[in-house]
Amino acid sequence: MRALPSPLKDRINALLHQKSQVLLAIDGPCGGGKSTLTEAIAQVFPNALIIRADDFFLQPHQRMPQRLSEPGGNLDRERLIKQVLKPLVSGGYQGHQRYNCQTGLLEAVPGASRPLIILEGSYSHHPDLSPFYDLKVFLDIDNALQLSRLEKRCRPEALAQFINSWIPMENAYFSHFDIRNQADIRLSAR
């Protein structure tokens, strides 16, 4: 388990003392450790609500060439805003629907607002989403370590999809919106 870096822990604590609800978003390349960092935060702040951006990838009927050609276009930002971000801001969040890639179905995810909400996943710092956040963390990784991690967790055909599709799409998004430099805190994967 990754230890929670002190500057991040201190920043979260400071925000929690200022506000009754803090919305933190963690973005970065696949294999970078976003989920691991999220779990480290949850160990220190056990009452945190974790929302996975992966729950909001486009459903097959939404995967139109025009949408997929947009930087960050393969995330259903509209549904994320409607089901999670706006309800959190208004105090009415009671869960959302998760798109299950294996079954092709939307599944209910129960939930309730808490003092710390963590939105974890690629594309979570998209400019359409950023205005909702109190703190943006970017977790970076060098290419060699990224590929090494993906090789360990993926079958060869899945790895090829990461190399040929997902990584180039993420890199286009990071570059187009200068995502790394928009973050409040930048960390490197270990």
Image (cartoon, rainbow, N blue to C red):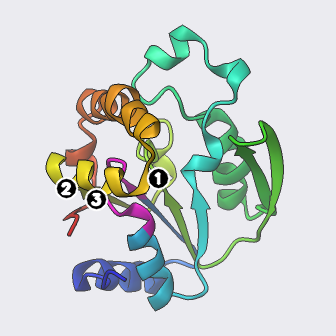
- Rendered view: 140 above or below 143: below
Residue 121 has which mark?
Answer: 1
Which residue is denoted by mark 2 in the rendering? 145
Residue 52 has which mark?
Answer: none
Name which residue lies at 52% across and 9% down.
66
Residue 127, given in percent of the width and then of the height, sits at: 42, 37
Mark 1: which amino acid? Answer: Gly
Real-space CA distance between mark 2 and mark 3, rounded to the nearest whole angstrom: 13 Å
Mark 3: which amino acid? Answer: Leu
**Taking 58 as reference, is 66 left or right?**
left
Residue 45, given in percent of the width and then of the height, sits at: 50, 87
Pick the quarter of the image with the N terminus: bottom left
Q: Is residue 147 visible?
A: yes
Residue 60, given in percent of the width and then of the height, sits at: 69, 24
Please name whichever residue, 32 or 137, is drawn nearer the observer in this view of the structure. 32
Q: Which residues are magenta?
A: 26-35
Residue 174, given in percent of the width and then of the height, sits at: 28, 36
Real-space CA distance between mark 1 and mark 3, rounded to the nearest whole angstrom: 10 Å
Which residue is denoted by mark 3 in the rendering? 139
> How busy is the neighbourhood of tag 2: few (under 14 within 10 Å), some, or many (20 plus)?
some
Residue mark closest to the camera, 2 vs 1: 2
Mark 2, secondary structure of its residue = helix
Q: Residue furthest front?
A: 156
> How busy is the neighbourhood of tag 3: few (under 14 within 10 Å), some, or many (20 plus)?
many
Is residue 91 part of the magenta span, yes or no?
no
Please name whichever residue, 110 or 87, is drawn nearer the observer in this view of the structure. 110
Name which residue lies at 47% across and 77% down.
39
Whichever of labels 2 and 3 marks the residue nearer the N terminus, that label is 3
Q: Are marks 2 and 1 in contact (CB under 8 Å)?
A: no
